[in-house]
Amino acid sequence: MQDTCAERIIRGRRSIRRFKGKQVPLDILLRLIDAARWAPSSKNRQPWEFIVVRDREKIEAIARIKGEEWIVGASAIIVGVSDPMRSPVYHMSDTAMAMHNMELLAHEIGLGTCWIGIYENDKVKRMLKIPKNKILVGAIAVGFPDERPPPRPRRSVEEIVFLEEYGRKIRND
């Protein structure tokens, strides 16, 4: 069976940490956010909000806060914020799924992305004026890729799947 377009996109996406100096236009960044809003969410509560950061000083500050120099090469950073009042239990996973939609579309249209783990970082929350009642889930660095990393090793399906209960391996008899 031939791979579908979705499978090629999923398998082809890589975390990109080297970007060309070219600016990603705002309308393209908004396309990524539009893809995010089509993600599934618990009871369709859509608890996500996003901050597009293109200001160089703020991007550099986030890089310093994280101690990750590669972040300064990104054209933009899209910060994901969730609202626990909209979805008390699933707001974080819903927002993370929405952000992954952005990563998949970015790959499909020739952009590179990399997740930045800044969950509830107080310095970033203050800098971006995120209200205390909102949760900083994470961020995605976005830009035109200046690298093509090879696929990383993945555990086999047989290693990660069980049938009916944990520990019961699937046998192909």
Image (cartoon, rainbow, N blue to C red):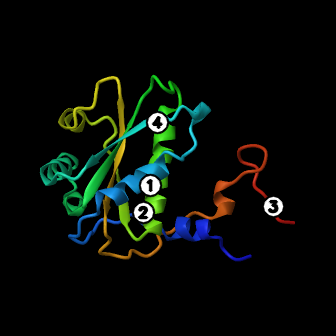
Q: Quadrant of the C terminus?
A: bottom right
**Element under disc 1:** helix
User: Whole-Å distance between the Cαs marked 1 and 2?
Assistant: 6 Å
The kind of residue tagged 1 is Met
List the residue tagged with mark 1: 102
* Badge 3 or badge 2: first in the primary sequence: 2
Specify the amino acid type for callout 3. Arg
Badge 4 marks a residue whose secondary structure is: helix
Left or right relative to 107: residue 128: left
**Mark 2 / mark 4, whichever is N-terminal:** 4
Residue 172, position in %: x, y? 82, 65
Q: Are marks 3 and 4 in contact (CB under 8 Å)?
A: no
Q: Which residue is mark 3?
A: 171
Q: Is residue 100 visible?
A: no
Residue 68 image position (x, y, % from top left)? 22, 55
Asked if marks 3 and 1 touch (Cβ < 8 Å), the reply is: no
* Secondary structure of the residue carrying numbered label 3: loop
CA distance separating discs 2 and 4: 21 Å
Write down the residue under mark 4.
92
Distance of label 1 from label 4 (alpha carbons): 16 Å
Q: Amino acid at mark 2?
A: Ala
Q: Position of residue 137 (x, y in %)?
A: 38, 39
Which residue shows up at 72% across the image and 51% down it?
A: 162
State which tag comes first along the sequence, 1 or 4: 4
Q: Residue at x 46, y 36 (%)?
A: 92
Q: Residues within 10 Å of mark 2 (few under 14, many from 20)?
A: many
Q: CA distance from mark 3 to mark 1?
A: 36 Å
